[in-house]
Image: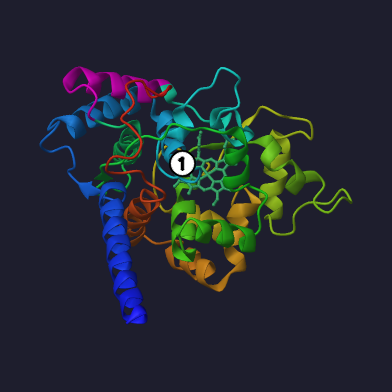
Amino acid sequence: MASLKMTISCFFFLQILLFSLSSFAQTNAQELEVGFYDNTCPKAELIVKQTVFNTIKKTPTLGAPLLRMFFHDCFVRGCEGSVLLELKNKQDEKNAIPNLTLRGFDIIDNVKAALEKECPGIVSCSDVLALVSRDAMVALNGPSWEVETGRRDGVVTNINEARANLPSPFDNITSLITQFQAKGLDKKDLVVLSGGHTIGNGHCPQITNRLYNFTGKGDSDPNLDTEYAVKLRKKCKPTDTTTALEMDPGSFKTFDESYFNLVSQRRGLFQSDAALLDDQETKSYVLKHMNSDEYSTFFKDFGVSMVKMGRIGVLTGRVGEVRKNCRMVN
Ligand code: HEM
């Protein structure tokens, strides 16, 4: 009899636990959706698009950092806008070394201000980042994709988390695969999203070792094309800390497939670009997309991987907040 009572109370306890867990999941892990603001702020996506298009028309070089900003947001604490937060003591993500070269924060402010005017307190800063990165690519004749929205903004930013979670240009393929896997992204996402390096710039310190002292013996990286290394050495003297380098020389303002052509010729700028030739799967993607006249597969793949990246660690439902000012918590 006692054991029957015990079984019944265990059963009820389990029922209550399952019910609480499922309602917790409903309030906290609501799905993102395309058109989340259709009813609450119908003009939201149009406002973002207009602001981004006007900006890129005037300053096409801003497209690249706006794409990179979304990547750097998503890899640290998830896509919840923590990359935008500023702390008085400067111990925020923005001040971590990889983020010191991010640009375009004022564009995010402009977009957010326009949205606040139209529908105050509705559109999150993390969704602004997701929409802006897509629209910036479209403005550069790149791919388009449907952006899922409904993210809410986080309230924490920490410099050490940015240091720990952002991949380095010196990383090898094993490390890159592991870091992407930790965020739920696979090898295909890694090689496809690395294709984002078809636009924008790097800087000399990220390749000085490849040019001058690869193994500590004054040598250069054997995985870097020798003719290209000569060109790069002319631009980057060993102590140069400031010179910018086009990652896709000649077409760094146009989103195209030439990145894969460069990587296949051992002309990828960073070790992390060259590393894509060190794994069978990533290598075969690179080779398949070099010299291709037809951009459709890469463009489509890029959109799919961006949507996947945009789901990392999102806050939805009642978790987090919708910031009024993207630089500070409410
Ligand atoms: C795979 C690991 C990655 C590494 C190690 C890496 C590293 C870097 C580094 C070191 C720079 C140069 C920044 C500067 O000096 O200003 C850079 C630039 C850039 N990265 Fe990546 N990146 C990676 C993946 C990605 C992804 C996934 C995206 C977006 C989908 C992306 C988009 C960009 C863009 C657009 C730029 C140019 C930024 C500008 O012109 O200001 N990167 N990346």
Tell whether position 318 is magenta.
Answer: no
Mark 1 vs ligand 1: CB below 8 Å: yes
Figure quadrant of the C terminus = top left
Choose between 5 and 73: the one closer to the eye: 5
Q: Is residue 114 magenta?
A: yes
Residue carrying label 1? 199
Q: Which residues are magenta?
A: 106-122
Could you tell whether 7 is left or right of 246 in the image? left
Identified by mark 1, the residue type is Ile
x, y percentage for residue 125? Answer: 34, 31
Q: Quadrant of the N terminus?
A: bottom left
Judged by its main secondary structure, the magenta piece is helix
* Badge 1 element: loop
Q: Position of residue 154 (x, y in %)?
A: 41, 35
Picture residue at 57% right of the left edge, 46% below the top: 165
Q: Which quadrant of the figure has residue 242?
A: top right
Q: Residue at x 62, y 57 (%)?
A: 274
Residue furthest to the right: 217
